[in-house]
Every structure is written in C-alpha cells, then in structure tokens.
Amino acid sequence: MRKFNFTFALIALGSLLAFSACEKQAPELSIIQVTLKASAAFNGVTLSNIPVEITNTVDNTKKVVLTNPAGVAKFEDIAPSTYNISSSLELSPEIAFNYTGFNKAVTINATLSSITVLPLQTSVQTLTLDGKAGGDLVIKEVYSLGAANDGYAIMFKDQFFEIYNNSDEVQYLDKLYVAFLGPTKAGQNANDVVLGLPLTSVVYASKILQFPGTGTQYPIQPGMGAVVAINAINYKELKPLAVTVDNTKAKFDTYAITWLQSLGRTGSTFFDVDNPDVPTMNCIFLNIQNNGFFNMDDYASIALVRLSANPTETIQDPTVTTSQIFYTKIPVTAIIDGVDILAKSSSAAFKRLPANIDSGFSYAQANGSANYTGKSLRRKISKTLPTGRVVVMDTNNSTVDLEVVTPPTPYSYDKK
Ligand SMILES: [Ca+2]
C-alpha cells in the first residue's frame, strides 16, 4: 500500500512539474513580418530604418519595430490576436520634390486593419506607402494679346486661356467660375488710375464665366489641360501666321450674344462667334452694357473660383465718374488659383489680386505695349515626373511662376 502510494505521488508530481514548465514557455507565440514598399509614385524612397507599428486590437497594446535595410520589420513573440499595422514616413521638401514636383513636405503612409494572427503562425504582410502629392487646378497659360493687327482680321479674337490639372487626381471643371478682374486699367500709361478698393477679402470682377456641367461631366485628368477659347476657330487657316493659334481643339468657347439679347442688350457678331461643336461657357456677368463679349483685357488678371452659387454683390468703380461701372465681388477664399497680369514691370500699384493668391504679377513686355505680338504668358515647368506628368510651378508668385512664350502653346504640357 505504502509503496504504491509513493509511486503514485511521484508520477503525480512529475506530471505537475511537466505541466508547469510547459505553461511557463507556454503561450503559443506568433510572428508578424512586415515588408514595407512604396507606391509607384514614390518608387525609390529609402525604406530602411522606418518605424512600423502594430496595435493589438483586443488590449490596445502597441509595439514599434524599425525596418532593416531590406525594408522588413519583424515582430517576434507576439500574442496571437488581431492587429492593426501602420507606418508613416514624412518626406522633406527636398526629397518630396523628386517624387511630386512640389517643394513641399509630404507624408506617405499605409495601414492594414484587423490582421488575425493564429498561435505559432508567422503572418507575412506588405505595407505599401503612398500619399497625396497635393496640387490643384491652375491657370497654365493666358494668351490675351492677340496675334496680328493686319487688317483687323484677327486682333484679339484668337485669345484663349488654359486650365491645367497640376494635381495627382482627377479634377472636375463643372460649375467652376472664371473671373476676369478689374479694373481694366492696368498701369499701361500715365492716365491709368489705381482702383483704390481694398484687396483683402474680395477681388473685383468685370466679367465672369462659368464652366457648364452638373458636377462630373467635365473631368480633367492629372497632367492634362483644358483650353477655353474666346472663339474656337482655326486662326492659322484664316491667316497662317506663325504667331497665331488653332483654337478648334479648345474644350470650351465663349459666346455671349444670345445671353445679352435675353437681357435686352446687344452683342457683337464681329468679335463673338460660336463653334457649335465646342461646349459653351455659361455667361454670368459682363460689366459692359452693349456690344460686349467675353474677350480678355490685354492685361488680363484671372481667377479660377469655386462658389456654390453665382456671386451677386456688386460695387461701383469709384474712379470713373463719367459713367457707372460695376464690378462683382469675388471672395478671396473662393479662389482656387489666380494670376495677376498687368501692363509692364512698373505697374505693381495696379495689382488686382492680394498677395496670398499672387504675391507678384507678370507681364508680357517690360515696357508695355505688347498688343498683337502673339506673346503668351505660360506657367513654367517645376518637374517632369517619371510617369511623364508635368508638374508646373505654383509658388503663388506669378513673377517667378510665369514666362513669356511666342507663339502660344495650347496643351503643351499634356501627358502623352
Ligand atoms: Ca460653343
């Protein structure tokens, strides 16, 4: 009896010890192995020594491991559970420029949610870092001076401006407004008078157009332009000068006669021609009473504007006493992009845009008098990305962002 009890006790003790030892190593631990990668847009960024974080979604405990030179972060001895995995990398302006074309810091990141890791499992995951490069729609080119005064055949009827998608995602032109800013006096000669109204919260439009569409009818892809021609006509065919343009590839044109007639006013059949094959901009405001049309002033400050409804508040030009001239107020906060185009280098006092939209201004000829020269103001290239997409300069200073080109170059930056 006694011997039997002893043996039983030994066996029982042995089992207990074995069980305890097993319970100490016990937890059936797991591994998560994360390989960090970069999206095509950021292909080439350094992926070594980057923190990767896992969060246990059951108890919210976190653990951070740095990636090795191969971009791999290995989390060993972790409890089987469900994890969120994330990583984030801020690129300095200098480094970001190589990938985005903007001298602006950008954060690229990646997240995986609810990754379940079973006991003793090695879970292999890939995190692909990506980020928004930023950018927006910009005014890429303004051709307001016209080609030739030869027999008044063209004058400024061949004007156009081009909007360009400088971002990395599709943008829509639908319902956006284009405001030509007043006053028309732009510092060309000694009789020009500065408007004198404050340029703080509003700017003053002499003409306003609106893109047609209901919201998503007029997409513009990254790295592509949309030309708005005053008249969508091939002026090269009419007068094959090297300096003029074929506007038939315009995405939009302007035509005011029907609208003016509906208001009891008169349009100009000489200057204003509709191409029925090209979508026509909506006419919103024209501060000229008769024979008006939506040409640009020679020195044409322009703003691209996002508003939920037509702007209606007007203000009378205080510098004109012989007649009543009104401008429509545009809130500065609604301006997506604006370029201040004045007569010449000495015209700074005539700025129509505040410094936060355009801290400088541009002009086609330092001494003014540049009409009918075929000169066009075009935004410079910041960088051409490996994908072929051109990123244009957008430092909100048209003095440095714009350059003079002859002849005009519609769609010159379009991604092939
Ligand atoms: Ca049309």
Image (cartoon, rainbow, N blue to C red):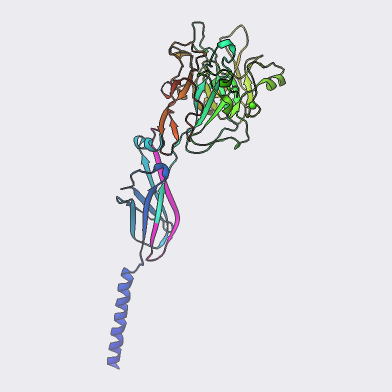
Q: Report which quarter residue 212 is drawn in.
A: top right
Residue 167 x %, y %? 47, 35
Is 155 magenta? The answer is: no
Residue 113, compared with residue 275, is above or below; it is below
- Judge from the rendering whether residue 155 lies leftward or rightward of residue 377; answer left or right: right
* Residue at the far bottom in the pictured view: 1
Depth check: 388 or 261 in front? 388
Segment colored magenta: 102-124
Is 110 magenta? The answer is: yes
Q: Looking at the image, how many numbered discs can be counted on the residues? A: 0
| Quadrant hosting ligand 1 | top right
Residue 177 x %, y %? 58, 27
Residue 42 x %, y %? 39, 42
Residue 194 x %, y %? 51, 11
Depth check: 88 or 256 in front? 256
The kind of secondary structure the magenta stretch mainly shows is strand
Q: Quadrant of the N terminus?
A: bottom left
Residue 123, compared with residue 313, is above or below; it is below
Q: Report which quarter residue 151 is drawn in.
A: top right
Depth check: 12 or 278 in front? 278
Residue 181, compared with residue 97, is above or below; it is above
Q: Report which quarter residue 13 is drawn in.
A: bottom left
